[in-house]
Image: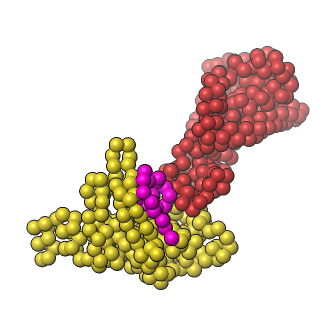
Chain colours: A red, B yellow
Amino acid sequence: MLRKIGLALVVPAALFAGWWAVTAFGIVQTYQLASPAQVGNELISLAQDGTLAGDVSASVWRVVVGFTCACALACVLGTLVGLSKAAERAIDPTLQAIRAVPSLAWIPLILLWLGIGEAAKITLVGIGAFFPVYVNLVAGIHNVDRKLIEVAEVFGVRGIERARRVIFPAASPSLLVGMRVGFTQAWLFLVAAELIASTKGLGYLLMQGQQITRPDQILVAILLLALCGKLTESGMRAFERRSLRWTDTLGTSS
Amino acid sequence: MNAIEIRGLTKTFGDHVIFEKLNLQVAPGELVALLGPSGCGKTTVLRCLAGLSKPDAGWFNVYGEAAIVFQEPRLFGWLDVRGNVAFAARNDEERARIDELLGSVGLSAAVKKLPKELSGGMAQRVALARALVRNPSVLLLDEPFAAVDALRRYELQQGLREIVEARGLSALLVTHDVDEAIALADRVLVLGGSPASIIADLVEPDREGILSALGFSGSVLNAVRA
C-alpha cells in the first residue's frame, strides 16, 4: 500500500522540484510563473480571508447538483433506449446529434436563456456529465449476455423484474464507468461555465487571477481543480471497485 | 400420459431445415438421452421445449413444471451461490428449500461464494440446484457436463442420477457423449441425418448398439468389442 502511494508520488515530486528550481534560479520570471512559496502564501491568505472556502464550496455544489440531475436523467433515458428498440429509434439519434456539439458552443445559448445565475452553470455541468453516463449505460444494457436473459426467460422473470434483477446488475460495470467519466467531465464543464460568467468558484478565481495578473492565484486555482478532480476520480473508483467485487476481470483482480 | 410428448415438430433456420416432423416421448420417471453429433439440432429440440425457440410446425407438451440446465452454468456473477439458487424461487416455501437443495448437490460449504470463486463442476451444481428450486417434474438437460473434466463429470453424472431417482423426475438429456448416454439414460434416442430425425430408439443400450446406430461399422466396432 505504502509502496503504491509512494510510486504515485514520484512524478508530482519531480514536477514540484522542477518548478521550485526554475523559479528559484530565475530561469522563469515570477510574474509568469509564481514560485512554490508564493503559491503557498497565496493559498494561505485566500484560506484565511474565507474566499477559498467560498470558491471551493460554490464549485463543488455546482458539480454535485449538476452531476446528480444529469445522472438521474441519463439513467431514465439510458434505460428506455437500452431496453426498447422503439425508444432507441426515437430518442438516440437526437441525443447523439446533441452530443456532437462542442461544450463551449452551448455557452452563448445557455446564457441567453438562463442568464448568468446558478441555473446556467448547473445546466452546463449537467450537459457535460449526462453523455458519458447515458452512452455507457446504453452500451452496458446492450452488452448484457443473452444467455443470462434466457435464464430469466425460463424462470418467467420478465419486464421490470427482469430489468431490476438481471439487466441492471449486469450493466452496472459499464454504468459505473460512465458515472466516473461523467463526474470528471462535470468538472471540465464547470470551469468553462465559471470562466465566462461568475462571481464565485474556482473558475472565477482563475479568471480573476489572469485579469489582475496574479500567477500565484492562477496556480492556486489550477492546483485546487487538479485536487478536486483527482479526489472525485479516486472516490468514484473506490466506489466502483467495491460495487464490482463480483466481476472476474483484470481490473478487479488484486 | 407421457412426461414429454413431441409430435411432428419442425424447425428451420432460414432455408436450413434442422428437423422435420420429429416425434419423441419421455415416460414419467424415465431418463431419456437424445444423442447425436454436434450441430444436429438436439439442443434446438430442448430449446423448443423450454420455450426459448419457436418451432415452425408441430406440437409438444411437457406435463408439469419443467426446468432446464444449460450447457454453461449461466450463473449471475453478482449473486452468491445462495442468491443464484434463490433467483428461481417464487415464494417462501421455495426459498425454504434452498439450503436443503444446496446440501443435496454437495454445496453446503459454498453458499456464500461468488460464481467467480467456483470451479466449473461446482458452478454447474449450482445451476442444477437452481433448476430444482421449483420442484419440477421434468428436467431438460443440455449437455450439462460437457465443459467439466472427465473425473468430475463421472461424479456429477452419479449425483444427477441419484437426484433424478430420489425425486422421481423425468428427464431429457441432450448429449454427444456416448458414454454419458449409457451411464445415465434408461433409453437412448439417436438423432442423425439432415434434416435430423430419430434414427434409433434403444433401451439401455451398450456402446456397440449405439455406435452401429450412428453408422459406425467395421474397425470402430471391432475396437469397441476388443
Relative vertical location of residue A162 with respect to residue B157 in this rendering, above or below: above
- Residue B134 in the image: above or below residue A241: below
Give the quadrant of residue A213.
Answer: top right
Query: Residue B196: x, y in percent?
Result: 30, 57
Task: Note whether residue A191 is visible.
Answer: no
Residue A167 located within the stretch drawn in magenta? no
In this view, the residue in front, B121 or B96, is B96
The answer to whether one can see residue B187 in this image is yes
Give the residue at the far right of this rendering: A49
Q: Which quarter of the figure has residue B29?
A: bottom left
x and y percentages locating residue A125 in the rendered image: 74, 30
Q: Quadrant of residue A222?
A: top right
**Residue B40 position within the rendered picture, expressed as x and y whole percent measured from the top left:** 31, 56
Q: Residue at x 59, y 38 (%)?
A: A85
Region rendered in magenta: B44-63
Residue situated in front as seen by the camera: A108 or A192: A108
Please report the residue visible at 68 percent of the width from the left and 46 percent of the height from the top.
A235
Quarter that holds the N terminus of chain A: bottom right
Question: Residue visible at 42% across and 53% down?
Answer: B57
Image height of A191 relative to A161, above or below: above
Identify which residue is drawn at 76% across, 24% down. A193
- Whole-percent x, y for residue B213 in the image: 21, 67
Q: Would residue B155 appear left or right of A139 to someone viewing this image?
A: left
Q: Is residue B136 left or right of residue A75?
A: left
Q: Is residue A130 left or right of residue B208?
A: right
Please tell me which residue lies in front, B60 or A179: B60
Q: How many marks?
A: 0
Residue A241 higher or lower than A36, as above or below: below
